[in-house]
Image (cartoon, helix red, strand yellow):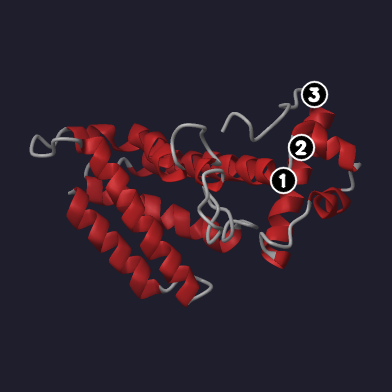
Amino acid sequence: MQTAVRRRPVQRRSLERFERILDSCAELLDEVGYTGLTTKEVARRAQVPIGTLYQFFPGVEGLLGALAERNLEHFTDRLARRVEAEQPDRMGALVDLAVEEYVAMHRAVPGFGVVDFGAIGITEDEQNLHLLDDVLDNNSAVAERLWTFAADLLGSDGDRPDPRLSLRIALECADAILRLAFRTDPEGDPALIAECKRLLRGYLS
């Protein structure tokens, strides 16, 4: 999202402050949720002046957008390492890797349960639907990033008229099922996670 960050840090000290602000935002999301999040408390937790926070972010939505983008960057980096190590040659194998990395991040990364690549459980107004991109909604933006991994495996299916649309639909399904899995069990309901994999493998393979 172009408006999530006012200024991208360049110098190391500024970059450290920027990351510390996002880390504090993520921690607070786990503690107080979206409705309790304030820029004042994020700045206090990050031990920076409130003016420093506003140098980087226009407000709470900017913080959420930057956090969602960082989560997506980390997810795609993790998935890229798994793909390089395991070289999946079928779409089903790639599905398993992607779901496993998402679940691992949900369990371990602060704030991920509130803001993964969007704003989970937050009223889906126009602003929250576009935390990652000004034009694409959050899931469409994620699907575009995942196309890098899926293009060869999906694009080879001649019976699939629009493989990008198929990936987008699969992502919507995964989003709904995995949210349910973590609502059912804070660690992610294993049966629902397994069903998510099975559904996606069947649809995309």
Contact between marks 2 and 3 (CB within 8 A): the answer is: no
- Name the disc covering residue 67, or none: none
User: Mark 1 Cα within 10 Å, few/some/many (few <14, many 20+)?
Assistant: many
The residue indicated by pointer 2 is 18
Of the pair 184 and 91, the residue shown nearer to us? 184
Residue occupying image coordinates x 39% and y 73%: 190
Residue occupying image coordinates x 74% and y 36%: 57
| Residue 42 % position (x, y) | 80, 51
Q: Residue furthest front?
A: 125
Q: Marks 3/1: CA distance?
A: 17 Å
Task: Name the quadrant containing residue 164.
Answer: top left
User: Mark 3 Cα within 10 Å, few/some/many (few <14, many 20+)?
Assistant: few
Quadrant (top left/top right/bottom left/bottom right) for the N terminus: top right
The amino acid marked with disc number 3 is: Gln
- Name the disc covering residue 11, or none: 3
- Residue 38 lies left or right of residue 162; in this view the side is right
The residue indicated by pointer 1 is 22
Query: What is the secondary structure assignment of the residue under circle 3?
Result: loop
On screen, 100 above or below 134?
Answer: below
The amino acid marked with disc number 1 is: Leu
On screen, 131 above or below 36?
Answer: above
Contact between marks 1 and 2 (CB within 8 A): the answer is: yes
